Image (spheres, rainbow, N blue to C red):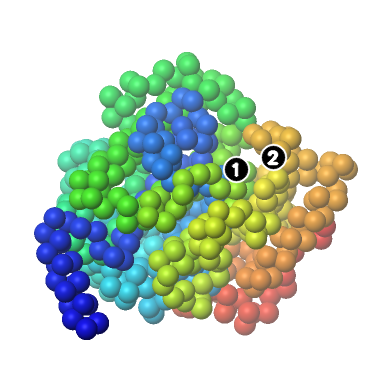
Amino acid sequence: MLLFAMKVAGGLLMAASFITAAPVRPNVIFIIDDQHSADMLGCYGNKDVKTPNLDRFAGEAVRFEHCISNSPLCTPYRAMLMSGQHPLHCGAFDNDIELLPGHGKYLGEVLRDSGYHMGYYGKWHLYGGNRNRGIPPGPYRYGFDNEFLSNNCTLTFDAANAHYWDQDGKTRKRYGDWEPYAQARQAMEFIDRHAQESFALFISWHPPHNWPGANGGYNAPSDLMALYDPASLTLRPTVADNALTRRIYQGHMAMITSIDRSFGMLMSKLDEHGLKDNTIVVFTADHGDLLRSYNWQMNKRRAESGSTRVPLIIRWPARLKPGVSELLVGSLDLMPTLLGMLDLKIPETCQGRNASEAIFAGKDDGVDALPLFEIRMNWRGVYTRQYTYSESLHEPTDSNIPDGRRTFDVLYDRQADPWETHNIFDSPDAAQVRSQLHKKTHELMRRFGDTGEARNKIVELSLREEDIATMNLPLGKRKGEWEGRLKGRPIDFLAAEESTPRLKAN
């Protein structure tokens, strides 16, 4: 009788599939944009930026106040998302260094092996080496074996130049449109094709990252630029108020509005197929943009919130009650948390926390600090609900690091100073807090086996010989078909080296 009932139920499900009924297993849509700080969305309190679609979405979702990019840089973030591992373990500790193969234990591979139809569109930046090439089918797609249309990593978003590599990774094709709009349409077509099966769709938009051009590279189509009057925009108190800064804010916000419109297109397609209730939709960013705060010209790579604090909004109407969460969530936590939400086995290689139970229960406790680190700049730190802390591990002989210790020795009390305008690292009144955060920083470093070794030493130990010289050149001077490939896990070479920890005394 039970077997008969199951057959009947299966038949009913098949009949219903002709009207695009949602599969029992939830779908996944995971969206990342690039260089987008949390304070640059309306739902996070910004009154200038125009993001009606994302704001409406946030009202139907759980919006996280404390999502942190543990290492605020493109490749390390994406490596942590895909592997659930610290970059010294998965390999991609700096831009243009490869993510090592996952052997079935990475996010895309687990989803694929669980029966999901996989799709990936947009920026990749995990293949290592020369950015101007496609990613071949196989282990370096880390489970996204079904549909994969990426431009690896490019900084041309306009209709005349934006492009992607075909499914085989061999032929480059032009979008003929502003990149996020074109990628949104590709993703919408993916939903049309696979609405009747369980799918996992990942979209990675380049904007609002700056790109080559005038005005600091913050440019967008003219209709979007016209939405913003530079003179009326509210600037962070950490930037110099001048014409160039205001023009940068205008372009940055215009690009964010293009992301919002692209996002709205995707959500409309989901509604069209009746898939909203049983689809987990995640919106987040790889890291923030300091937008010239602290007179810093690199956009990111610092511990301050403009660099590390990113939006995280998760909607799943079937399971999640909308609200605002104070839970601390880092990049390392995203893979195990998503798999936990899907009730899938989390590989033992994951080093982040599965926060799914806390999210389902609406609990905000359980974690008191998140690790922060940036290996090229060689600082380490922690983020707590109240404090942002980092310490430089540089020696006086380290080169190419502006201001050295003075730049990266920071401590902010965000409750008293939410915009992080007053660095109290050297304040006698903050000595006890600094000591506590210093100890927590080193505790987390030891957890990952991180000795604080300099980035060039890690390159020397773990990168293939033929790529070391190129990797140590500035980005603009790297020529040819170099690959940025590793000999193995950096953490293993560091352990074999028995390097002396470069941990700074408190």
Q: Secondary structure at mark 1?
A: helix
Can residue 71 be spotted in the picture? no
Identify which residue, 186 or 357, lies in the foreground: 357
Count residues near mark 1 (Cα–Cα under 10 Å), then give few for <14, some for 14-19, many for 20+: many
Q: Quadrant of the C terminus?
A: bottom right
Residue 250's place in the image compared with 182, above or below, is above
Q: Secondary structure at mark 2?
A: loop
92 with respect to 171 (left or right): right
- Residue 370 in view in this figure: yes
Q: Quadrant of residue 460?
A: bottom right
The percent position of residue 321, horizontal first and vertical second, equals 46, 49
Identify residue for label 1.
305
The residue lying toward the viewer, choosing from 226 and 243, is 226
- Residue drawn at 53 percent across, 44 percent down: 324
**Which of the marked residues, 2 or 1, is nearer the chain's N terminus?**
1
Please report the residue visible at 44 percent of the width from the left and 64 percent of the height from the top. Answer: 341
Q: Residue 372 location in percent, x, y? A: 62, 56
Type of the residue with mark 2: Arg
- Compared with 231, 351 (above or below) is below
Q: Are marks 2 and 1 in contact (CB under 8 Å)?
A: yes
Quarter of the rendering occupied by the N terminus? bottom left
- Marks 2 and 1 sit apart, C-alpha to C-alpha, by 9 Å
Nearer to the camera, 339 or 77:
339
Q: Position of residue 197 (x, y in %)?
A: 21, 64
Q: Which residue is mark 2?
A: 414
- What kind of residue is marked 1? Ser
Q: Nearer the viewer, mark 2 or mark 1?
A: 2
Which x, y percent locates residue 135?
A: 28, 64
Mark 2 residue crowding within 10 angstroms, few (<14) / some (14–19) / many (20+): some
Figure check: 188 above or below 440: above
Q: Residue at x 29, y 44 (%)?
A: 267
